[in-house]
């Protein structure tokens, strides 16, 4: 079995951070979104990964080669963003009769991965949501068999959203349906969707079984990313690199503090992730994510997302600051 991970999106809802950093590499709970996905799949036994890159794809490749040299990696470039269906179609030359699991590059979930991968059926992950109009939606019977899938319906007949994890046994038919939709220009909101190809497979007789995820950590915008960071910190527990330099520091767990950080006269936490080589002085930081090589002085931050190579000085704020920025709030 091979894993396909699409990471070509521009991450517009996380700007300004995604101007300089792919969304999949945004830090969360001392890791990155992409590293959590890869670790989950690799621990379940998957060795071969296909990454669909686009925007800032060179950073994805460099990160994978440096952080996960032990996995077999193939990189497929999506030059023009034409939707997830088009992205998956580009991987066809690298999937020859293999089963695949597709996990969207911003989808972090808790579920029984080994059980899903070993299932004799094709499987689609679902979760009940309040407003399913922004998702692919699955209509199911009482046993969880999927009867129909629709991409972002205006009048949903179900509140069970497709969360972005797909285990496909019938890959040849999937690629046939993707190719037919691409040939015929079948689009949803001006993009080729994977959901339309899945519906094509259902109409051709493929059986899909649903599985529910225990938790779905949304990493699509600042507020949801901070909430997911807090939840995952509680799950993973506090992690403070051994080579830190603390002086008169109070740590309120859970926190994650990266390598070579210097922190003085400050209170850190709860629910704070700090990247490597960051300096914090005379500050109070809580419920926030701080990037690497940041420099914070004399500031109180809450519910903030601070990019890498950033300098911030001043007073109490809730901030959303991208990389390579200098802010003086004094």
Image: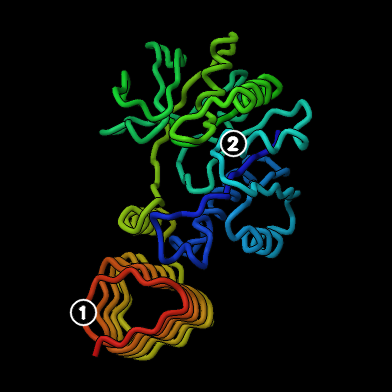
Q: Position of residue 129 (x, y in %)?
A: 30, 33
Q: Is residue 68 left or right of residue 138?
A: right
Q: Quadrant of residue 14?
A: bottom left
Q: Is residue 273 left or right of residue 201?
A: left
Q: Say which residue label 2 marks.
A: 102
Q: Residue at x 29, y 66 (%)?
A: 287
- Classify 147 as above or below 113: above
- Classify 274 as above or below 145: below
The answer to whether one can see residue 182 in this image is: yes
The answer to whether one can see residue 241 in this image is: no
- Classify 36 as above or below 189: below
Under circle 2, the secondary element is strand
Q: Position of residue 225 (x, y in %)?
A: 37, 56
Q: Of the two numbered discs 1 and 2 on the same chain, state the one appearing first in sequence.
A: 2
Q: Residue at x 30, y 88 (%)?
A: 328
Q: Say which residue label 1 marks.
A: 316
Under circle 1, the secondary element is loop
Q: Position of residue 53 (x, y in %)?
A: 63, 51
Q: Residue at x 46, y 26 (%)?
A: 211
Q: Nearer the viewer, residue 252 or 85?
A: 85
Q: Nearer the viewer, residue 300 or 52?
A: 52
């Amino acid at each position: 079995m091979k894993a396909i991970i699409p990471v070509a999106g521009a991450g517009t809802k996380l700007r300004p951070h995604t101007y300089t950093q792919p969304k999949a590499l945004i830090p969360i709970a001392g890791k990155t979104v992409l590293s959590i996905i890869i670790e989950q799949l690799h621990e379940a036994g998957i060795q071969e990964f296909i990454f669909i890159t686009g925007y800032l794809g060179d950073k994805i490749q460099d990160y994978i080669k440096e952080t996960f040299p032990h996995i077999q990696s193939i990189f497929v470039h999506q030059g023009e963003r034409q939707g997830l269906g088009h992205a998956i179609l580009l991987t066809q030359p690298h999937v020859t009769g293999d089963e695949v699991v597709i996990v969207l590059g911003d989808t972090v979930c808790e579920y029984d991965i080994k059980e899903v991968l070993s299932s004799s059926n094709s499987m689609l992950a679902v979760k009940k949501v309040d407003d399913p109009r922004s998702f692919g939606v699955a209509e199911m019977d009482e046993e969880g068999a999927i009867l129909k899938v629709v991409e972002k319906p205006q009048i949903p007949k179900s509140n069970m959203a497709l969360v972005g994890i797909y285990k496909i046994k019938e890959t040849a038919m999937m690629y046939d349906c993707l190719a037919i939709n691409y040939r015929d220009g079948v689009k949803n909101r001006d993009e080729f969707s994977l959901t339309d190809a899945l519906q094509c497979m259902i109409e051709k007789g493929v059986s899909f079984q649903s599985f529910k995820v225990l938790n779905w950590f949304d990493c699509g915008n600042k507020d949801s990313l901070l909430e997911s960071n807090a939840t995952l910190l509680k799950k993973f527990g506090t992690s403070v690199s051994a080579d830190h330099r603390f002086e008169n520091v109070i740590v309120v767990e859970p926190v994650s503090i990266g390598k070579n950080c210097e922190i003085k006269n400050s209170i850190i936490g709860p629910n704070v992730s700090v990247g490597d080589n960051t300096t914090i002085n005379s500050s109070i930081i809580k419920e926030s994510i701080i990037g690497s090589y940041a420099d914070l002085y004399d500031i109180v931050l809450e519910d903030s997302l601070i990019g890498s190579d950033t300098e911030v000085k001043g007073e109490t704020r809730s901030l959303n600051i991208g990389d390579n920025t200098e802010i003086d709030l004094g």
